Image: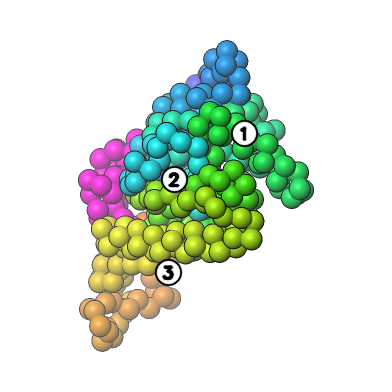
Amino acid sequence: MLSNYAELFLVCAIILMPIFYETSSRFRYYFKIFVYYAVVILNSFFFIPIFLFRPCDVRNLTLASKFCRLASPIISLKWEVRGAEHMGADRAMVMVANHQSSLDILGMFDFWHLMDKCTVIAKRELFFAWPFGLAAWLSGLIFIDRRHAQRAQTAMNESTKMLIEKRTKLWVFPEGTRRITNEIHPFKKGAFHVAVRAQLPILPVVYSSYHTFLDTKNKVMNPGHVIVTALPPIETKGLTIDDIPELIERTRNAMIETFKATTKEVENRFNLSGHGMTPAKGTTTVISRIAAALPGGVSKQPTTATTTVVSPLPIRPVVELIEPEARKIGSLLGGGDASPIKEPTAYRRKDVQRD
């Protein structure tokens, strides 16, 4: 009897999943996050026995990334890398990148083969998120306790010798905390201390804004395109500890300029307007077309572009139940119309969606 109920539940789940995926932005958001984490966790289970043959070797990360990167096409994310020649340089360096989301790591998986020998500074709490934490430790990640600045600084300094001897790159998120606020926040000094003391170059890496496809507050994750730019390395030879504030300012200003430029490029390429959840000016949606067809539900007002102003009271029940654009079942697998590369109109589904 229990097996029959289990089979019935499984059949219902299989039937209803595509329906929920196509009609609920919140379901799509959590489904994509689940797929991302599931791919990473499954790969962690699989690779832990393999990593034991060469523990704490950063080359393990290159191997793992080849499989973890498969999550990106499944959840309809495209990473466009620029400045690959800087990432691939066979030399030790300190790479600093802006930090917006855990999706940053998914992007790293996509181009880890370019960096080859690279390790990451990660918060100590991640080590206890097994099996990922154990797999990460076996891959040579450096865990630091952010609550104790002196301990964190010591751990980073101890890694310097390994970086130089093995010509390894050190990846750091100098903002410290991931925040999707459409800006690059002030940097902490740790990574720059390591670079100056070891006289290693700083390599700025900039992710364009996730606002073009991600809204964590309203639980929306649309198909996304992110430009990842590696800027020319900034040499630190001859610099001292006293030069660190100026070095930080110089690095951050260069990253802010690139961040704004690449974000604007993505917005223009896919016809976005500012925030990723907002359609470009003049773009009509299914909601606005239905609202216009309802008697007494609309009124025309002159603006710079021809728009339809919707009276909220008569049509509110309709608005709350309808997605801004229809979606195809095929987009469940991240293909077809889900890709903004193949169909830019996919990015026009940017109204804040409420299920």
**Amino acid type, residue under disc 3 in the picture:** Arg
State how far apart marks 3 and 1 are (Cα).
63 Å
Q: Is residue 118 left or right of residue 271?
A: right
Magenta region: 326-355
Q: Which mark is residue 16?
A: none
Q: Is residue 20 magenta?
A: no
Q: Nearer the viewer, residue 67 or 260?
A: 260
Nearest-to-viewer mark from 1 and 2: 1
Q: Are marks 3 and 1 in contact (CB under 8 Å)?
A: no
In the rendered view, tell whether residue 215 sits above or below residue 197.
below
**Amino acid type, residue under disc 2 in the picture:** Arg
Find residue 263 and report its horizontal and vertical position in percent.
37, 60
What is the secondary structure assignment of the residue under circle 2?
A: helix
Q: Which mark is residue 161?
A: 1
Q: Is residue 42 visible?
A: no
The residue shown at (76%, 48%) is 150
Find residue 9 and report its horizontal and vertical position in percent.
51, 28
Find residue 269 and report its horizontal and vertical position in percent.
26, 58
Classify 10 Å Cα crowding around label 3: few (below 14), some (14-19), many (20 and above).
few
The mark that comes first in sequence, 3 or 1, is: 1
Residue denoted by label 3? 316
The mark that comes first in sequence, 2 or 3, is: 2
State how far apart marks 2 and 3 are (Cα).
23 Å
Classify 10 Å Cα crowding around label 1: few (below 14), some (14-19), many (20 and above).
few
